[in-house]
Amino acid sequence: MIPRLIYTDPKLASVGRSAEERAAAHSSFETLTVDIQDNVRTICQSDQRGFARVHYGEGGRPLGATIVATEAGELLSGLTLAMTHNLSLGDIADTIFPYLSRSELLKRLGDSYNRRRRTPTAAI
């Protein structure tokens, strides 16, 4: 896993294959996107531009990710670690992140994944 970071404003960070590359290889995956606007830290700092997107396969294992945000490089580190060590988005959801940090965006990705995999009865 070799992460990439482009120093634009906001920054663009990615790791793994893009959705287009996975589709061309006929790889099965799903995509989650979380907007950064609801993150308390970004609200406090008046910098709510960006999103995090992850492509995942069986068992919620991340296959690729893109983050557009002021601190995109730092945020991508958690997803790169998960991909390198075969952790799932559920594992990320189980992680406790410091409150009032941008890294809570990763927890939101994991929580979004967990909400998708619940049965309709459990979602009530």
Image (spheres, grey):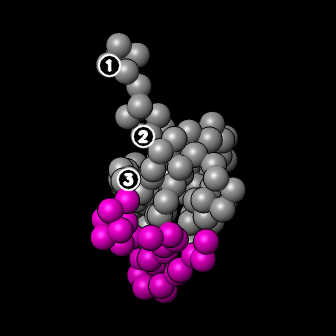
**Quadrant position of residue 73:** bottom right
Residue 34, placed above or below residue 6 = above
Return the residue found at the far front.
26
Residue receiving disc 2? 112
Asked if the residues shown at circle 3 and circle 2 are in contact, with their CB atoms under 8 angstroms apart, the answer is: no
User: Relative to 84, is 75 on the left or the right?
Assistant: left
Q: Can residue 86 be seen in this view?
A: yes
Under circle 3, the secondary element is loop
Residue at point 56%, 66% (across, down): 76
Between disc 3 and disc 2, whose residue precedes? Answer: 3
Residue 60, placed above or below residue 115 = below
What's drawn in magenta, residue-wise?
A: 1-27
Discs 1/3, front: 3
Crowding at label 2, few (<14), some or many (≥20) Cα neighbours within 10 Å? some
Crowding at label 1, few (<14), some or many (≥20) Cα neighbours within 10 Å? few
**Cα distance between the residues tagged 1 and 2:** 15 Å
Image location (x, y in percent) of residue 87:
63, 49
Residue at point 32%, 19% (across, down): 120
Residue at point 49%, 59% (across, down): 63
Q: What amino acid is found at the position of numbered circle 1 in the picture?
A: Pro
